[in-house]
Image: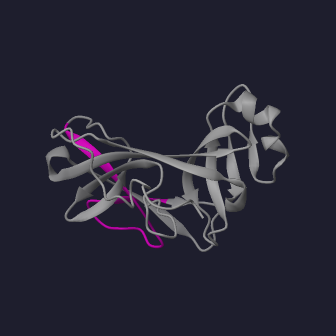
Amino acid sequence: MSLDAEGRLLTGYYGIWQDRRYPLSNPEPFRGELVLVHDTDEPLEHPWSAREVRGRAPAWYRNFAAVPAENVHGVVSITVRAAWNDCDLLIHDESPDRTRWDVEFFDGERAAASGALANDGISGDPRGRIAGWLPKSDVSGPISTVVDYDATGRISGSAQQRWEYGPLG
């Protein structure tokens, strides 16, 4: 699950299944099911299917489980937005050493014009997607949006999950 050092959810879809919050591949059910995602250092057993993520040491696995949508509640979409050099970006993850953010720029051309591609760890096409890792000290913000996909239509998640308190760092 994408959490920062303070335990706040980062950009993604999440739902609660069997009293535990999991990332979802999509907040909308397909054929009555939602797909849960769980990263571990060992492959999980039924109902999970595992895929080894290559290029990582030690090895780790992305596990998927398709479960009936009615068994998942509290489905939310979290968007953590921030800025770099007056460019809007999404924060997807935090580095294991907690010094960098995994980011994606909203406007590739603007990011390229602002020098984003000169940063180690940032790559992409100015006409498309520019993304990568930025030092936390270079990122300002955050603004977060939580959208509840449950039938209640209410905002869900704690204030910490909604980033209502404190700066990114």
Compared to residue 74, the image places residue 61 above or below, namely: below
Asked if residue 125 can be seen in this view, the reply is: no
Q: Residue at x 67, y 60 (%)?
A: 136
Q: Residue 120 in magenta?
A: no
Is 35 included in the stretch rendered in magenta? yes
Residue 149 at x, y percent in the picture: 26, 39
**Vertically, is 42 above or below 153?**
below
What is the magenta range? 32-51
Image point (20%, 65%), residue name: 19
The residue closer to the viewer here, 134 or 38, is 134
Query: What is the image's colouring?
Result: one colour
**Residue 79 placement (x, y as % from top left):** 46, 45
* Image quadrant in which the C terminus is located: bottom right
Q: Which residue is farthest right? A: 118
Q: Residue furthest top?
A: 127
- Left or right: 145 with respect to 123? left
Q: Residue 95 placed where, x, y %?
A: 62, 65
Q: Residue at x 42, y 55 (%)?
A: 164
Position of the N terminus, as image quadrant, is: bottom left
- Count of numbered labels shown in the rendering: 0
62 left or right of 20?
right
The answer to whether residue 107 is visible is: yes
Q: Nearer the viewer, residue 86 or 31?
A: 86
> Viewer-proximal residue, 144 or 43?
144
User: In the image, 31: left or right of 98?
Assistant: left
x and y percent of residue 67 in the render?
22, 50
For the point 19% across and 63% down, which residue is it? 18
| Relative height, residue 58 to residue 142 (above, below) | below
Left or right? Give the position of 169 relative to 63: right
Which quadrant would residue 81 be assigned to in this image? top right
